Image: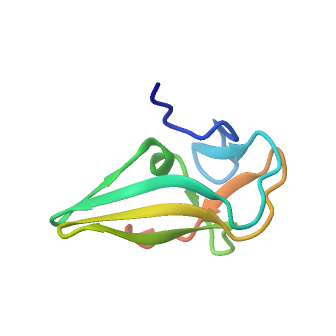
Amino acid sequence: MYKPLPESLTIKQSKVNGLGLFAKEVIAQGTNLGITHIKIEEEILRTPLGGFINHSNTPNVVKVELHDEKYTKKWSLVTLNNINKGEELTVRYTFYNI
């Protein structure tokens, strides 16, 4: 069964902007939470995980580029430090102008 988010995350109202990703439990540093973006040729597509994460200049997660196939790139979301239950996950935007 397809699940757009890991069991450890939920979507809630954000103090940053609109909706955001929040930890339902403590998440350890270095945890790979899944794929946020996929680039096929010149188009970057967001997954549900990538669609709800807000920007911060002091993020607690980072997008890590994965080289998949010859014409496809993927980015995975990895925690930079331990994330507390109820804490919003944020990333430094690199694909979009803010």
Question: Which of 69/26 is in front?
Answer: 69
Q: How many marks?
A: 0
Q: Please tell me in which quadrant of the rendered image residue 65 appears.
A: bottom left
Residue at 19 percent of width and 70 percent of height: 70
Question: Which of 1/83 is in front?
Answer: 1
Q: Position of residue 68 (x, y in %)?
A: 31, 65
Q: Position of residue 8 (x, y in %)?
A: 70, 41
Residue at 50 percent of width and 32 percent of height: 3
Q: Position of residue 58 (x, y in %)?
A: 69, 74
Point out the image quarter for the C terminus. Answer: bottom left
Q: Please tell me in which quadrant of the rendered image residue 32 appears.
A: bottom right
- The answer to whether 20 is drawn above or below residue 31 in the figure is above
Q: Please tell me in which quadrant of the rendered image residue 95 appears.
A: bottom left
Residue at 70 percent of width and 45 percent of height: 22
* Residue at the farthest top position: 1
- The answer to whether 94 is drawn above or below residue 89 in the figure is below
Task: Please indicate whether residue 52 sits to the left or right of residue 46 in the image.
Answer: right
Q: Position of residue 72 (x, y in %)?
A: 24, 64
Task: Please indicate whether residue 65 sits to the left or right of residue 18 in the image.
Answer: left
